[in-house]
Amino acid sequence: MDELTQNLLFHDHECSYYDERFGITYDRAGVAQALRELRHAAGVPLARVRRAVDIGCGTGYLGIAVAASELAEEVFACDLSAGMLGRCGANATRLSTHVTRVQSEVEHLPFADKSIDLVVGRGIIHHVPDPVAGLAEVRRILVPGGLAVFTSEPTAMAERTGGIPVQIAWRTIESVRKALGRDAGREEHKYWELAAMAANLHTFEPGQVEEMGRRAGLVPVRVGTGGFFSTMSAAAGYFLTGEFPRLGSSGAWRSVLAASWRAFSAIDRAVCDQVVPAHLLHTVQASFRAPVSRRVSAARANPRRKGELT
């Protein structure tokens, strides 16, 4: 099975529990959290634009926030998974906002050259088989000077230390289950947990992301690391909700996860991101601009490829 198909199958399955396991809420607090994350990663003020695209949108975390806050007149939400796009649509409806959903892989975005003002993506580059090709597509569709902002790309340190609470909890729970003889019938669950790990194709260091952006023709604006307690909190919540599915249907549990994530994210921004050595943090946050040509050419429409959206 190739990497693209692997990611498609997993995310079509994951869409049914993604928000529940991460404690993502589509309400005013959820939108505010997404915007804080986006502005922090951008490193520059976010002006209102005409067209924005959330690539690898998942259930719509960033794209819906951009639409709900009217940062863009028109917002597209792109994902390889039809299941994720379905939940994205439902989440947008819940907030009485609209995003245009488009099923597409990142390496072949269905938009005309220089037609998009803002590209956002949360935890998407590490799922892309060829990250440079994906970033080159972002460069292609951005208008000159257009901004691309990426958040929550995992570092190698995230794999080494971010999952420590999960490993401790897993060993404890498995030991109890085996002692009680309740480990039967969990083969499918274990399969999808392994599939979640297999879908994460890459980890990055900031310099790698910056170099990939340059190779793709983008100009770095801000590339750095962030996140420590928030990633541990998210991983623990994801694991526990997966192990005890009834938690996922509990509004109170989901509220606890969301509140914990917001609180730990605030601590990370105010403290950890400032004092913890950069190489110990768990995610890469990066923003780039499309280069602005010094040559002024006559304004004319770019030829459109089949299937492209203008």
Image (cartoon, grey):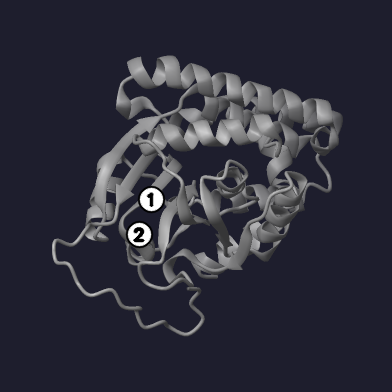
Label 1, on which residue?
148
Q: Nearer the viewer, residue 107 or 53?
A: 53
Q: Residue at x 45, y 51 (%)?
A: 49
Q: Quadrant of the N terminus?
A: bottom right
Q: Are marks 2 and 1 in contact (CB under 8 Å)?
A: yes
The circle drawn on residue 135 is: 2
- The CA span between labels 2 and 1 is 9 Å
Amino acid on which disc 2 is placed: Leu
- Crowd band around label 2 with a 10 angstrom C-alpha radius: few (<14), some (14–19), many (20+): many
Secondary structure beneath label 2: helix
Residue 70 spot, x, y in % from top left:
56, 45
Amino acid on which disc 1 is placed: Ala
Q: Nearer the viewer, residue 185 or 17?
A: 17
Left or right, residue 125 beside residue 44: right
From what the image shows, is residue 52 above or below residue 266?
below
Residue 74 spot, x, y in % from top left:
55, 58
Left or right, residue 255 beside residue 3: right
* Residue 179 visible from this viewpoint: no
Residue 108 spot, x, y in % from top left:
44, 72
Q: Residue at x 54, y 26 (%)?
A: 230
Label 2 vs 1, first from the N-terminus: 2
Q: Residue at x 83, y 44 (%)?
A: 184
